[in-house]
Amino acid sequence: MWDLPREGTSLTAHTDTTDRAGRGDRRDLTAFIAGLPKAELHVHHVGSASPRIVAELAARHPESKVPADAEALGDYFTFRDFAHFIDVYLSVVDLIKDEEDVRLLTYEVARDMAAQNIRYAELTVTPFSSTRRGIAPQAFMEAIEDARAAAAREFGLSLRWCFDIPGEAGLEAAEETVRLACEHRPEGLVSFGLGGPEIGVPRPQFKPYFDRAIAAGLHSVPHAGETTGPATVWDALTVLRAERIGHGTSSAQDPALLAHLAEHRIPLEVCPTSNVATRAVPDLVHHPLRSMVDAGVLVTINSDDPPMFGTDLCTEYAIAARLLELDAAGVADLARNAVTASFMERDEAKRLNAEIDAHLAAHDG
């Protein structure tokens, strides 16, 4: 798996010289994060499959090149660059052969989320990847909805769906994705996105499909500015009418863009470890998270494809706390940001914010 920063690394200057009391503070903050009720807004369905589940699926489908050994997946999930990551990701997508695979994957992802005290998640799902492999649309929808109901019943986790276009598959995928969203809309669907590589996949070509999704009542949440410059983010905002931006890493290169995001309260879905693993940024020290926050942008912290990057949402919160030099109250604010930026119902948001407040009060007390 991706080698995450450890205690004593040069993430920020003060982490190299912290005394034992400081290390104790960090352990205390780690425990606070683990118990913190959280929402996650940028996390992918297939990309959330744990090594155990990927290995199980690979064993069920031995014709795949994906290792059927959870230990061997560590090397398999080491990426040379973003293009290599996409290749590996799609090889895991190929393991989802039928609706039983879909249901198993979704249910197990929900179990892993609940173990981190994630109370609400908007899971990015790419139905085109399954329907093009022969899974009937209605069977796919029933599988994810069955897992969603089980997650609420058994784990207390509220799942919602973002259907995204795999950009590398072109306009055929866009047409199929918006058709599935509109004609086979599952109850949990709240938003419409665009993922995959950005280089060579300009955002404006997808305008008609986003227009149809928005007209159907879905929110616009495309990926943009992860591996390309700020112009891609501007396209997402002005052409695709984005209400949130997936990643938006390069936004920090354009002060006018940061000011626009801050003024209009358009959130960024920030995924620090993912950005390093795919080489979108060279390392965490150079991650633009701090400049985004300093500019007044509403940022949320997310894990993207957590097992593939050797991370989880708790780890991403801990990384953000270091980069931003936050205490427990500051971390709680990050959790509230995710609630604010989410598409959950008002009563649900009120309850989750109350849980966050109670957790912080118990910590402070």
Image (cartoon, rainbow, N blue to C red):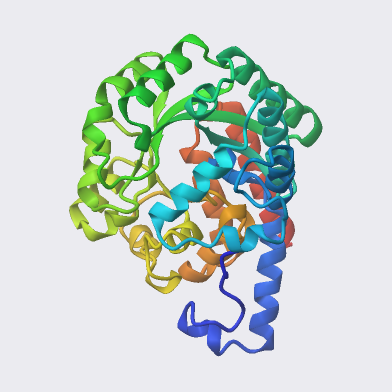
**Residue placed at 73% from the left, 39% from the top?**
108
- From the viewer's perspective, tell me whether residue 41 is left or right of residue 154: left
> Is any atom of residue 42 visible in this view?
no
Quadrant of the drawing holding the C terminus: bottom right
Badge count = 0
274 shown above or below 99: below
**Residue placed at 73% from the left, 29% from the top?**
152
Q: Position of residue 192 (x, y in %)?
A: 42, 27
29 shown above or below 99: below
Q: Position of residue 22 (x, y in %)?
A: 64, 82
Quadrant of the drawing holding the N terminus: bottom right
Question: Which residue appears farthest toward the front when viewing the image?
Answer: 63
- From the viewer's perspective, tell me whether residue 298 is left or right of residue 112: left
**Front residue (pair 106, 217):** 106
Q: Position of residue 341 (x, y in %)?
A: 46, 39
219 shown above or below 358: above
**Residue placed at 66% from the left, 67% from the top?**
29
